[in-house]
Image (tube, rainbow, N blue to C red):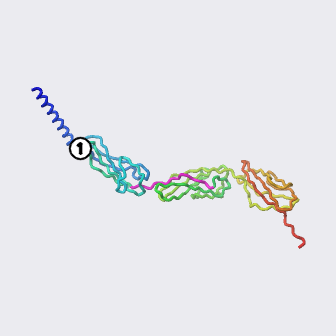
Amino acid sequence: MKLMFTVLLTFICILASCGADEQRTTQNTVPVITRAEILPTYPQRGSRINLRIRASDDDGERISYAVNWFCNDRIIGSGLEFYLSDVEKGDRIYAEVTPSDGHQSGTTVRTTTVIVANSPPKIIGVKLEPEAIVSSTGEMRIIAEGVDPDADSLSYFCYWRINDGNRLPDSSTTLRLHDLGLEKGMTLTSELYAHDGDTVSSPYVLEIEITNSPPMLSAEQESIPYSPDSIVYALPIIDPDEDNLLYELIEAPPGLRIDQTFGILHGSVTETEPFEILVRATDTEGAFLNARFTVVPPVIPDKTQ
């Protein structure tokens, strides 16, 4: 009798448990998504996108999500986050999101569509022509190397400043320096930008120091006429930075000398044919110019004619 009572009690418990499970299943409410949107709103090629989801579950159960990503109505991936690698500017991106509480799945919701936006270009390197800028440089040019994720063609412009002053009116990548009054020790700052027709890159900033300029000829090298018993010639050599110069006579026949401070060639020679001299002018920082001049005797009229 006791054994039959135990078996009956066990059977009743099993029935009660099954009934409770069935009741829980029938009473479970599915989760509901009230809002799903893609962030950022204007994604670019190469950016990572994700979802901001608002959902509720009346049972208070934890909600998970199954997500499929679409590009131009073609499925391209899954997961709460996605990396936009194989897309192009103008592509249409949306996601389909299905919630689940672990027991049942809710209604699949489609997000609004976002459009892949233009990606800004980027400057990855520059080159100066000439590489060193001195006070006597007449013109300089910046050659930029840029990339555009959307393969758009690029143009470049540049804002210039001298010693952090106001912007110069010229915004081209080639700058004429003659009229800027540049001096040794000044700083020329450039802000270089790339433009893809829609978006401008971040600036690529260069600080260019105006360095010491070597001495230079102030006039074209011309032949020096002379009388063998008297040569006096002021060499046409100047220093753009107005540094003092030291003059040396490197190659010359006997009898010629040079004033080391003022660069005046003087003396007498016995040569009757044109000859060359080599002069070196050195500034206070060691920069120098080697200049070669041709010295010719004067033309003597033929008295027999």
x, y percent for residue 289: 74, 53
Task: Say whether residue 43 is left or right of residue 62.
Answer: right
Which residue extends farthest bottom? 305
Task: Say whether residue 70 is left or right of residue 167.
Answer: left
Q: Give the labeled residue for mark 1.
A: 29
Q: Amino acid at mark 1?
A: Thr
Asked whether the viewer can see residue 223, the reply is yes
- On whether residue 119 falls in the magenta region, the answer is yes
In the image, 170 versus 79, the foreground residue is 79
Q: Is residue 108 above or below residue 299?
A: above
x, y percent for residue 6: 13, 28
In the image, 178 versus 227, the foreground residue is 227
- On whether residue 68 falls in the magenta region, the answer is no
x, y percent for residue 19: 17, 38
Task: Say whether residue 105 is left or right of residue 47.
Answer: left
Badge 1 local density, few (<14 within 10 Å), some, or many (20+)?
some
Asked whether the viewer can see residue 169, the reply is no
Which residue extends farthest top? 2
Examine the residues drawn in magenta and state their main secondary structure.
strand
x, y percent for residue 284: 73, 48
Q: Is residue 300 above or below residue 51?
A: below
Magenta-colored span:
115-129
**Which quadrant, please, contains the C terminus?**
bottom right
The secondary structure type at the circle numbered 1 is loop
Residue for point 53% across, 59% down: 155
Which residue extends farthest right? 304
In the image, 237 versus 243, the foreground residue is 237
